[in-house]
Image: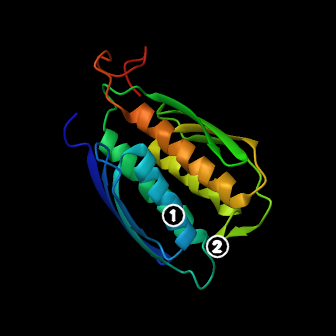
Amino acid sequence: MIGRTAAIERKTNETDIRLRLNLDGTGISKTDTGVGFFDHMLEQVGKHGFFDLELTARGDLGVDCHHTVEDTGIVLGQGFARALGDKAGINRYGNSTVPMDEALVMTALDFSGRGLLVFDAAFPSPKVGGLDTEMVEEFFRAFCQHAGLNLHIRMLAGKNSHHICEGIFKSFARSLCQAAAHNPRVTGVLSSKGIL
């Protein structure tokens, strides 16, 4: 399980994104997307998932944050898919329930190879800092499609949009860490089909 890393670059007419990812890191993150609160959330993924993450994104923020956030989800999903390779020896599944003050969020995920998001959370406010809260779902949808991940996100309680959002990202990070972790009892891939 040595060398579970990825370097991804994606450039379009709307965004220019560069990622370096180490799944077996210590949680050191350096992100710069131009959307401060989104950077804060991506840093939670690194910190609470113990992934080393360097990401820069330049997008058409003069329009809005949509392309930057969605394309970051694409690139991060591609990074996880590349770093995990054939997914041999990993747990495959992960789940976590995280409290963030009055908010409580549950995530459950499966590196099944099938990209699907079930998102059951509502934000009281349309923005947190420079992040449109409707873009949280779009980020995770893009991530799932490009990582080959089945992800359920459920808000169990919450009144503050900042707390809800941070609870989602922290819970997601912990679930990712669990699912991507090497399990010495797993021979090959954890599937009766023999492939994920």
Residue at the disc numbered 2? 129
Quarter the C terminus occupies:
top left
| Residue 105 horizontal side relative to residue 9, left or right | right
Above/below status of 95 relative to 194: below
> Callout 1, which amino acid?
His
- Label 1 CA crowd tier, 10 Å (few <14, some 14–19, many 20+): some
Above/below status of 60 relative to 170: below
Q: Quick one: SS at disc 1?
A: helix
- At horizontal 48% and vertical 62% (from top left) the residue drawn is 72
- At horizontal 28% and vertical 19% (from top left) the residue drawn is 184
Above/below status of 54 relative to 158: below
| Residue 47 horizontal side relative to residue 159, left or right | left
Quarter the N terminus occupies:
top left
> Callout 2, which amino acid?
Gly
- What residue occupies the far bottom of the structure in this picture? 62
Q: Where is residue 183 in the image (x, y as percent from the top left)?
A: 32, 23
Is the residue under label 2 in contact with that under label 1 (CB below 8 Å)?
yes
For the residues labelled 1 and 2, the Cα–Cα distance comes to 10 Å
| Residue 161 horizontal side relative to residue 69, left or right | right
Decide if residue 47 is in sight here.
yes
- At horizontal 33% and vertical 56% (from top left) the residue drawn is 28
Residue at the disc numbered 1? 40
Quadrant of residue 139 in the image?
bottom right
Q: Quick one: SS at disc 2?
A: loop
- At horizontal 35% and vertical 28% (from top left) the residue drawn is 90
Q: Position of residue 55 (x, y in %)?
A: 38, 65
Q: Where is residue 109 in the image (x, y as percent from the top left)?
A: 54, 34
- What residue occupies the far front of the structure in this picture? 101
